[in-house]
Image (cartoon, rainbow, N blue to C red):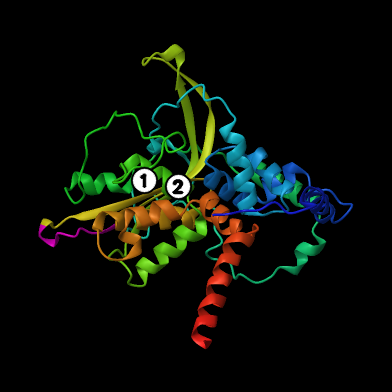
Amino acid sequence: MAYVAVSGGEEAIEESIQLLEYYRSGTEKDMELEAIEKKMSLLVDRVMSEAGLYAPTYAALALKQCEGSTDEAVFLLRAYRSTLKRNFYTNVTDTRNMRLIRRISAAFKDIPGGQVLGATYDYTHRLMNFHIKEEDSAELYQRMQEKIASQEREEVKPFGRVSDELKREGLLDTYEKDDATPFDVTENLLEFPAGRSARLQTLSRADTGFISGLAYSVLRGFGQVHPTVGELRSGYVEMEVSYMNSSQESIYIGEILMTEVEAFNQAEDKNQLKLASGYGAVFGRNENKAIAMSVIDRELDTGGKYPPQDEEFVLMHGDCLEMNGFISHLKLPHYVTFQSKLDAVRKTRGQKHE
């Protein structure tokens, strides 16, 4: 593909970048990083998930830098992540020990440990609240802190997964523990067929809209899966690394907020009289993406003629950076290639009129 330099382009580009600062300045009122991180947490969660870096403050900084564009923020955060030295790999974490803030099941009314509704927009009226225009943020924060302080503290005990009971009944397949080193998609090119670790990493980092759209197409009939959410859980998971490369001792380095989903549907071979499951896991509280990921994870196992069943189609076209980068390149000068196409059309038209 041919590109050409444009006379005076460097000066124009510098002015264009300054103009971005003008649009970002907007008003004299500043938006502090803490306000973005805490009050736009769902947006921050999405950026972290698609960038593949759990860093709420840096995700907020990226959003502030690029006027709230999720695409640009993901680009900035992932580019920053690529400059960081990787000192450790965390130990495998059992999410059964998640400190839950929300846990529901659409498959069972009564589940071991009970359901925890938590915070959700699912039951709101979704009407504009114009009182927020006059809201006093300091007063709201103080009121919420007092309300929390007045609540009786209750220890949250770890719950097993809903799928554990189904496995005990033989309704879901069980698998032996796999200690093989996961495929790292940040350091290696995808190969097909992709291993399960590569698939889940790629789906977790994929563009939220892309994954949701694919899952929606599956539910509308362009696929075989129409699952039931067996369990959706959000909460904090502790992260540990091995101490001095010892497999016997580990060090706690912090915790992350994440959402995971297991979705169930009938297996392809109905003679097996079993269920099959799909899995989704993302940073933060991005529930719809986690559900969509579980749908696509399951759909990729079915095989078939539809795009959501094609592993290469799904995994190679969902990356936010790749898709937006390739689309954005269409804005760059293509004078040579277009001129050749134009000349070919003119030549053909001329021959027809002779």
**Quick one: SS at disc 2?**
helix
Label 1 sits on a secondary structure element that is helix
At label 2, counting other C-alpha atoms closer than 10 Å, the crowd grade (few under 14, some 14-19, many 20 or more) is: many
Q: What's under tag 1, amino acid-wise?
A: Arg
Name the N-terminal-most of marks 2 and 1.
1
Residue annotated with mark 2? 204
Counting from the top left corner in percent of width and height, residue 196 is at 31, 43
Judge from the rendering whether residue 70 lies leftward or rightward of residue 22; answer left or right: left
Residue 237 drawn in magenta? no
User: Which residue type does callout 2 highlight?
Assistant: Ser
Tag on residue 68?
none
Q: Could you tell me residue 213's position as x and y percent? A: 45, 64
Residue found at x 55% / y 43% = 51
5 displayed left or right of 30? left
Give the residue at mark 1. Answer: 199
Residue farthest toward the front in the current orientation of the protein: 354
Magenta stretch: includes residue 269? yes
x and y percentages locating residue 251 in the rendered image:
48, 19
Residue drawn at 66 percent across, 53 percent down: 4
Question: For the view shown, which residue lies furthest in the right direction?
Answer: 28
Give the Cα distance between marks 2 and 1. 9 Å
Give how far across and how far down residue 187 sits, in percent.
45, 33
In the picture shown, does residue 87 fall above or below 236? Answer: above
Residue nearest the observer in this picture, 150 or 200? 200
Q: Which residues are magenta?
A: 264-271
Q: Residues within 10 Å of mark 1 (few under 14, many from 20)?
A: some
Q: Is residue 263 visible?
A: no
Quadrant assignment, res 181:
top left
Q: Nearer the viewer, residue 172 or 335?
A: 335
